[in-house]
Image: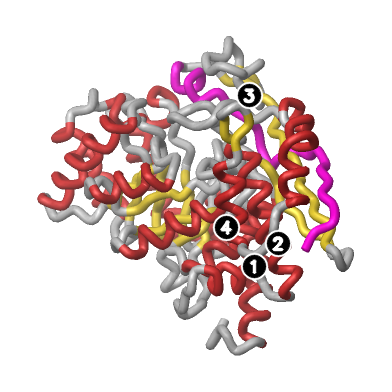
């Protein structure tokens, strides 16, 4: 099926940030941060993002490719360390490419599983490498069979969901006011993310800064939106609520109830209300928190991100009834077949399915994620990469619309 494999070094859509240093109070200096990194592998608290494109040449000279890329907060939350392209080029050439060239290309999923389990000296490949290679593998099957990647996934997993457009979730970065205006003007389905990653400067020691922001957000939608436009409010707080309220569940519940009241009539999702820097403790705390919220009849939804680093992690969060929605952070799960199976597991247990990822991905990984989202009919997908809103939204929206029109022409979509 393939006759050669190449690579090219590239940039990603944002930067690598040392989350531990930022949460510890690293001061901003323009677009950079002052201070010493706290996470192993970092040379600065903020440094450029990198990527590697894996390029397959098919036997008929068609080109297929995918991008190896890692998340902004690499090395945090139990995830793989910082992805440095220079450390992987020789490994790709000497070990990975020869394996891919000699292996039989019979099944997209089977080959992805092999790459996910491929080891060198008893160590798996970095999740970023597995992620990029699996994207390229999917594209090879798409090119070979002359079908969209959405169709390849659906056929491989015997999926028969009705295909329709899925909601897009845009993220603001630190520019959380101007970015919201952009989102409203383009009628984004879910917004704004908010990047509430510091208690003192963004949440407030009693949560007052986020309260003020949500009030402003609702009013801004009313002013710039139109009748009937009611986006979901999805705020990522990076564990800061737990810090501010000293992990007191009663106080956190009271605070979330207040946030929900302020947000009404918009549905409210809170991502990462606490981060206990331990998988088991995280699951236990979120399970108790969610039980209290449901017991109070509150509708605010808890979204898990940190410590959901594998398919098994995601299953364990769901079994413990710890979440309403899971961010399936595609680069963190390695080969994309894991993201597909995680999404299907969420749907099978009535848990919100969010095909997420990172601002630090690439245009290519974002396009492939769209096909995952469409194939499994996720509840929402992240507009990525970057933090400028417009660029990531354009990439995801346009890839989705193109694919829907193609599938409609084939009779696989009833309406667009």
Q: What mark, if any, has residue 139 been given in the picture? A: 2
Q: What mark, if any, has residue 110 been given in the picture? A: 4
Who comes first in sequence, dot 2 or dot 4? 4
Q: Nearer the viewer, mark 2 or mark 4?
A: 4
- Residue at the spot 22% in from the left edge and 49% down from the top edge: 321
Q: Nearer the viewer, mark 1 or mark 3?
A: 1
Who comes first in sequence, dot 4 or dot 3? 3
Residue 257 seen in this snapshot: no
- Residue 361 versus residue 45: which sits nearer the camera? 361
Q: Nearer the viewer, mark 4 or mark 3?
A: 4
Residue assigned mark 3: 46
State the quadrant of the N terminus.
bottom right
- Residue at the spot 55% in from the left edge and 42% down from the top edge: 117
Where residue 258 appears, x then y in whole percent?
23, 44
Where residue 378 appears, x then y in whole percent?
45, 64
Whether residues under marks 1 and 4 lie with C-beta atoms below 8 angstroms apart, the answer is no
Residue assigned mark 1: 149
């Amino acid at each position: 099926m393939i006759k050669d494999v190449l690579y090219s070094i590239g940039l990603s859509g944002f930067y690598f940030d040392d989350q531990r240093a930022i949460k510890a109070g690293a001061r901003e200096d323009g677009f950079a941060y002052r201070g010493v990194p706290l996470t192993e592998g970092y040379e600065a608290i903020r440094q450029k993002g990198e990527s590697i494109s894996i390029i397959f040449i098919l036997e008929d000279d068609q080109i297929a490719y995918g991008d190896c890329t890692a998340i902004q907060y690499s090395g945090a939350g139990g995830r793989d360390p910082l992805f440095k392209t220079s450390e992987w080029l020789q490994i790709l050439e000497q070990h990975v490419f020869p394996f891919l060239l000699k292996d039989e290309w019979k099944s997209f999923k089977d080959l992805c599983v092999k790459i996910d389990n491929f080891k060198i000296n008893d160590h798996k490949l970095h999740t970023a490498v597995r992620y990029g290679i699996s994207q390229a593998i999917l594209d090879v099957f798409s090119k070979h069979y002359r079908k969209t990647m959405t169709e390849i996934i659906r056929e491989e997993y015997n999926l028969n969901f009705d295909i329709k457009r899925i909601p897009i979730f845009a993220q603001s970065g630190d520019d959380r006011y101007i970015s919201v205006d952009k989102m409203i003007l383009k009628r984004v389905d879910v917004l704004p993310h908010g990047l509430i990653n510091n208690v003192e400067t963004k949440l407030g020691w009693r949560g007052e800064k986020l309260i003020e922001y949500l009030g402003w957000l609702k009013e801004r939608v009313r002013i710039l939106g139109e009748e009937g436009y009611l986006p979901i409010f999805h705020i990522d707080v990076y564990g800061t609520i737990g810090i501010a309220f000293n992990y007191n569940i009663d106080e956190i519940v009271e605070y979330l109830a207040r946030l929900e009241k302020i947000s009404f009539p918009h549905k409210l999702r809170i991502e990462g209300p606490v981060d206990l820097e331990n998988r088991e403790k995280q699951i236990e705390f979120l399970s108790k928190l969610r039980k209290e919220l449901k017991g109070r009849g509150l509708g605010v939804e808890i979204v898990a991100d940190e410590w959901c680093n594998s398919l098994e992690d995601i299953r364990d969060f769901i079994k413990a009834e710890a979440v309403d929605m899971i961010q399936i952070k595609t680069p963190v799960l390695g080969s994309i077949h894991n993201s597909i199976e995680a999404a299907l597991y969420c749907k099978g247990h009535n848990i919100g399915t969010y095909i997420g990822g990172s601002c630090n991905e690439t245009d290519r990984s974002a396009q492939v994620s769209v096909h995952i989202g469409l194939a499994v009919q996720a509840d929402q997908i992240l507009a990525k990469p970057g933090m400028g809103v417009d660029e990531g939204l354009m990439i995801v929206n346009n890839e989705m619309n193109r694919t829907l029109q193609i599938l409609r022409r084939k009779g696989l979509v009833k309406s667009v």
